[in-house]
Image (cartoon, rainbow, N blue to C red):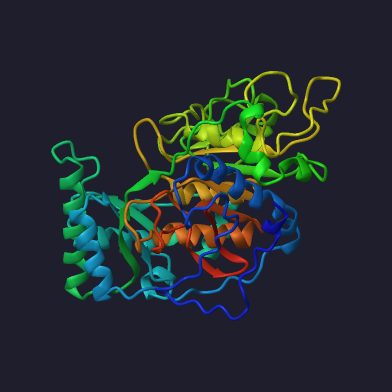
Amino acid sequence: FYALLALKAPQSAQKTESQRARYCVGHIAKTSCCGRSPIAQMARSVVYVSAALVVANAAARLGGSARRERGRRSLTDDSFIEQVKESGEADGLSGIIQFKLDKDYTHVKIGYAAAVAARVADDADCGTKATRLFREAGKHEAKHVAAGLDLWYTMDCGADDEELDAHAASLRASEKVREFLAKGDHKGIAVFEPQIVHKALAVEKDAYRSLQTHYDAINLDGAWEITTGDPTVTVQVLDSGLDPDHPDLQKHLWRNEAECQGEAGVDDDDNGFVDDCHGYNHADDTGTDLLGDGSHGTHCSGTIAADNMNDGIGVAGVAGGDGTEDGQGNALTGVRLMTSVGFGKTDVNGFAEGLTYGADNGARVSSNSWGYNSWGMYDQAELDAIDYYNSEAAGFVVFAAGNSDSKKLWYPGCYGEDEFHGAIGVAA
């Protein structure tokens, strides 16, 4: 467990666009990176969450650092275009196209970004309008503009077409992207890419603490002698949602008091989201239903902060406190859980926006047990969101490395700019 403190990449490590460093920590059980042994499956979520919680205090001390312009892949990169073709044929694309406008393009600089986006949508010929990928963020909008998040747009190119199945939607998105890039007229565009299919990296369900032997493997009892979780630290779980009525999680839910005490249907705290008392469902676009598709998010939340009162209910969380309460039954220890939903009941979407939501609303660690269907591919908007999280929240974005027993580059877990910018990709 204590070895997780050693998260810095070697100074000699050199990273290129095609070989970004993977920050893998915590190899548990005798498996290869991203192995599948039963012990490893149970331990994986514990390890990557533990790593994030260990460095959370360090994150609070780092402060925002200067934002850097990262080199981006060329719009005419033949290898990228070939990847788009292969991913389309392998059902690896969702049917949505995303693009970012060039901040230095004259019409963008003088305030006509929406008009440029409309022209790009017409040229792409998907038959739909382009809308902002990151919604207007109220009191946080100035930071989004400074980070260039307001220049990201998205358009449906088959995802919601009832006449197209998943395979046809993937092929259509691939075709439209390749046709657009082949035209050669890319004025005003910095990035143009298909959205990749996202998948949850599920693990086996935990049993009761007496059966949680994976905790013993990382000496969690020893870690609890130092801390059982700081209530001033908020951990975002971006997954399939959380069951807000689960008895083992009640005392550790993050609260956005302005919304919890505010008027229904109103953005009471001016953060761009309505009724986000405990978080937001970005996939289904609602703050009142945080239980998306399946129980995986609830499982991950329990691994992080299930109540540790030895009350016979559920499991023990890595940072679920020591059972200390105030006179009104509120937990005085243990981290707080912010819920963000990317795997919703009606859609799988909103991951980039979910990351910026966590950064803007006080989370210092983001737990992500999901990835893509295609290796070597990534959504640039999500990498931009990770950079925003690192810089604006002084926080850590933690990803599972995957369950496919592969040493290939699987994003977002393998994304890293340097020791302070990028994701922490963890394998067990």
Residue extending farthest front: 30
- In the image, taking residue 415 as reference, residue 333 lies left or right, namely right
Expressed as whole percent of the image width and height from the top left, the position of residue 349 reads 38, 44
Q: Is residue 126 visible?
A: no
Number of numbered discs on residues: 0
- In the image, taking residue 225 as reference, residue 364 lies left or right, namely left
Which residue is found at the position 40% from the left and 54% from the top? Answer: 405
- In the image, taking residue 229 as reference, residue 347 lies left or right, namely left
The answer to which quarter of the image holds residue 374 is: bottom left
Residue extending farthest right: 327
Expressed as whole percent of the image width and height from the top left, the position of residue 153 reads 36, 56
Which residue is found at the position 35% from the left and 64% from the top? Answer: 376
Which residue is found at the position 38% from the left and 75% from the top? Answer: 106
195 w.r.t. 192: above or below: above
The answer to which quarter of the image holds residue 335 is: top right
372 w.r.t. 281: above or below: below
Viewer-proximal residue, 385 or 425? 425
Expressed as whole percent of the image width and height from the top left, the position of residue 380 reads 40, 62
